[in-house]
Amino acid sequence: MSLITLLFFSTISLFKISNSSPLKPHPLPILPLPTSQQLQWQLGSMAMFLHFGPNTFTNSEWGTGKVNPSVFNPTHLNATQWVKIAKDSGFTRVILTAKHHDGFCLWPSEFTDYSVKSSHWRNGTGDVLAELAAATAEAGIGLGLYLSPWDRHDLSYGKTLEYNEFYLSQMTELLTKYGEIKEVWLDGAKGEGEKDMEYFFDTWFSLIHQLQPGAVIFSDAGPDVRWIGDEAGLAGSTCWSLFNRTNAKIGDTDPLYSQGGDRFGQDWVPAECDVSIRPGWFWHALESPKPAVQLLDIYYNSVGRNCLFLLNVPPNSSGLISEQDIKVLEKFRQMKNSIFANNLARKAVVSSSSIRGGQSLQFGGKNVLEEGLDKYWAPEENQKEWELYLEFQDSVSFNVLEVREPIQMGQRVASFYLESRNIGSGKWERVVSGTTVGNKRLLRFPKVKSRSLKLVVDKARADPLISYLGIYMDKFSVSSKNTTKITITRTLQEEQQQHDSTK
Ligand code: FUL
C-alpha cells in the first residue's frame, strides 16, 4: 500500500471515530441542591424513633429531672430486637433519645452522674447507646441521636456559658465514642416559665459537622433537615425542600411555613415528619398503637409528600418493643409492599411531547420506568408543553399515582396533573392534580380504568425532569374505615385548591 493510500484510510477511520455521536450534556442543576448527606437521608424514606428512659418506668412524658435513677431498670433490654424490627419493617435508621428533657443519660456520661451508671440496670455498668450502636452496625442500618437541649436536671441549665460547655461536652462524647452517627436530632421544646438561656446553635452545628461529617442535623430550622411543624406526621400538600433558614427560629416556628417549605427559598432543607405509633412518645401500659392503615395514611402524607417518615416506636419497661406494636408494623409493611411491589405502568409504552436533544436512549420517556436518580425523562428546551404518555395494550385499573424528580438536579415541578382518555368518547379526563413532587409524590384517588394516560407538568421552576412514574392499586386505604376515606377526600380537595391557586 502506498503512503498516500495509507494516509487516506487512516484519515477515514479517524473521521469515523470522531463521528460517533457524542452524548447530549445533562441540563444544568437548579439551585439550591441537596448535599450528599441530605440525599442519602432522603432516599432512606423512613426512620424509627426510640423514646426510652426513666419516663418509660414512671408513666410520664416530660420527666422532672428529679426522679431517682434507680427507676431505670429494663430487665430484658435487647437493642438487637429494636434494630431487627426496624430493619424488617423497612426503616433505614433508628434515632434514640440519648437524653430527653429530664436530663437522664442512656450512656455513662463523664459529665454527670444522672445516667445509667447510677441505675441498677446491668449493675450500673450498662450503656444503652453502646448496645444500640453495636446492633445497628451489625444490621447495617443508620444510627441517630436525640440530645435534648432543654435539661431539667443539670444545675448548669440557665447559665448560658456553663450549660453550652456542658452540652457540647456531652455531644462530643456521643459523637466520638459510638462509631458513625447519621443524624443528630435537636428538639426545640422547652416548658413554659423555664429558666431563660441562649443555646449557641452555630457552634453546635459546626462541632457536629466536624465530628460526624456524614450526619444530618435536624431542628426546627435545619441546617440540614427541618421539622415539619406538627407531630402528626403530616406534610403540606405542597412541600418544597427549598426553605429560608433565616425565616425559621428554633423553638418558635410557623407550622405553615415548615409544612410547605418555600418555592423561593435559598436553602435546601427538606422536612422530616415525626409522629408516634402510640398517643404518647414514651411507652405507657394503658396506651395502644395506631392501626396499620393509619400508618399507611401517614406514609402517603409524609414520604408521599417529599418528606422522611420518622415513626416513634417506644420500647416498654422490660426494654423490648411490645408485641402489639410489632404486629401493627408487620401489617403496615405487608400493605405497603403489596401496593408498591407492582407498578402497573411497567406494562405501558411510554412516549413524551419532546426529548432533550432528541436523545431517546439518554433522556427518553422510558427512563421513568427505571428506578434510580441517574436516569430521567428530560424534555427538549424551550417547550410550551411538558407531557408524558402511557399507552397500554389492555386497560389497567389503579387508584394511586407516584411521581419522582431526580432531586440531585434541584426541585422543579410546581404543578402537574394526570389525565386518562375516555375509552368511549376519546376525550382526556382529569384524574388528579398536584403541586410539588420532589423526591416522591404519591396521590390517591377513586379507582380509574384506562388504556391511555397523560402526565402533564404545567408549572416548573426550570425544565421539569421526571425520574420515576408509578401507578398502583391500593386495596387497603380505599376499602378501609371512614377515617381514611375522609383523609383521601380532603387530600383531593386540598390538591385541587393548591393546584388552582398556583395557576
Ligand atoms: C417534643 C418533645 O417535647 C417530646 O417529648 C418528644 O420528644 C417529641 C419528639 O418532641 O418536642
Image: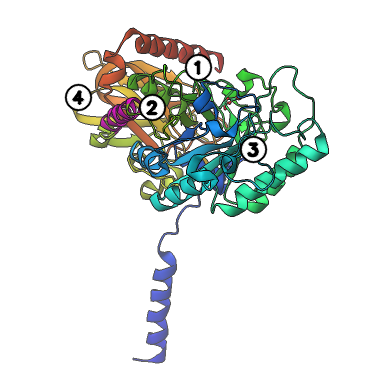
Q: Earlier in the sequence, mark 4 or mark 1?
A: 4
The residue located at (47%, 39%) in the rendering is 94
Res. 404 visible in picture: yes
Cα separation, mark 3 vs mark 2, equals: 58 Å
Q: The residue under label 3 is which amino acid type?
A: Tyr
Residue at 26% of width from left, 37% of height from top?
A: 346
> What is the C-alpha distance between the residues marked 1 and 3?
53 Å
Q: Where is mark 1, residue-wise? A: 499
364 displayed left or right of 342: right
Q: Label 3, secondary structure: give it.
A: loop
Q: Amino acid at mark 4?
A: Ser
Question: Viewed as shown, does residue 270 lie left or right of 198?
Answer: left
Q: Which mark is residue 395?
A: 4
**Depth-wise, is mark 1 or mark 3 nearer the camera?**
3
Whether ligand 1 has any atom under 8 Å from the Cβ at mark 2 is answered as no
Per the image, label 2 sits on a secondary structure element best described as strand
Q: Percent position (x, y) of residue 408?
A: 52, 44
Labels 2 & 1 near each other (Cβ < 8 A): no
Residues at marks 4 and 3, CA–CA distance in whole angstroms = 64 Å
Span of residues in magenta: 324-340
Spatial distance from mark 2 to mark 1, Cα to Cα? 14 Å
Which residue is label 2 attached to?
455
